Image (cartoon, grey):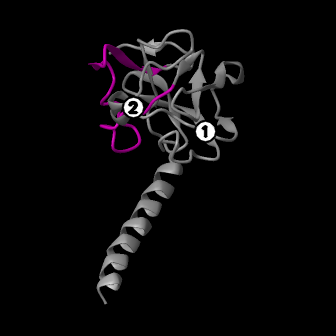
């Protein structure tokens, strides 16, 4: 009987972890090692600061001014606040997104991060739904963060 008490909580934890991982994978926000989304979509949305890039669910995409040479400078605690847009499959583009500017780059912690005009792309954990740009202009982890225009440049508030 004591063995049964141990297995039930462990089983519940395993099921909950699987549900969370599946939910994150669908957003492209999964940890690079946790199994990334099979494919992601980058599209354009219009808002108070003009036109900017979003994922397939309308969540704003950001660039980190500390990134150099197309490589991410955001790992560890930075990546927990600014999760990278990860794709293990096709990266689709919506109207207004340049195919020539869209790509991926290998991350040193695993996975392939989506890039635009050479900038690795990130979400902001403080944006809870489509259309939010709460991370715009924040200076965290050593440099500013900006939403990305369709030209590939950061938009400053």
Numbered label attached to residue 104: none
Number of numbered callouts drawn: 2
Please tell me whether mark 1 sits on a helix, a strand or a loop. loop
Give coordinates of residue 71: x percent, y percent: 54, 17
- Neighbourhood count class around disc 2 (C-alpha, 10 Å): few under 14, some 14–19, many 20 upward: some
Name the residue that disc number 1 marks.
Answer: 87
Mark 1 or mark 2: whose residue is earlier in sequence: 2
Range shown magenta? 121-148
Please tell me whether mark 2 sits on a helix, a strand or a loop. helix
Between the residue at mark 1 and the residue at mark 2, the CA separation in whole angstroms equals 15 Å
Give coordinates of residue 11: x percent, y percent: 40, 73
Q: Is residue 17 left or right of residue 110?
A: left
Tell me: residue 62, above or below residue 153: below
Tell me, yes or no, whether the highlighted magenta stretch contains residue 140. Answer: yes
Please tell me whether mark 1 or mark 2 is closer to you in this view.
Answer: 2
Name the residue that disc number 2 marks.
Answer: 79
Give coordinates of residue 7: x percent, y percent: 37, 77
């Amino acid at each position: 009987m004591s063995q049964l008490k141990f297995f039930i909580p462990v089983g519940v934890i395993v099921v909950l972890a699987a549900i969370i991982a599946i939910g994150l994978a669908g957003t492209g926000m999964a940890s690079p090692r946790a199994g990334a989304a099979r494919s992601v979509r980058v599209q354009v949305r219009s808002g108070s600061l003009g036109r900017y890039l979003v994922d397939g669910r309308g969540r704003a995409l950001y660039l980190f001014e500390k990134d150099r040479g197309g490589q991410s400078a955001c790992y560890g605690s930075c990546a927990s606040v600014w999760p990278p847009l990860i794709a293990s499959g096709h990266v689709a583009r919506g109207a207004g997104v340049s195919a020539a500017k869209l790509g991926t780059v290998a991350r040193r912690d695993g996975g392939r991060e989506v890039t635009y005009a050479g900038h690795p792309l990130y979400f902001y954990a403080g944006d809870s739904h489509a259309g939010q740009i709460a991370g715009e202009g924040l200076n965290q982890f050593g440099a500013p963060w900006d939403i990305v225009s369709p030209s590939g440049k950061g938009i400053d508030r």
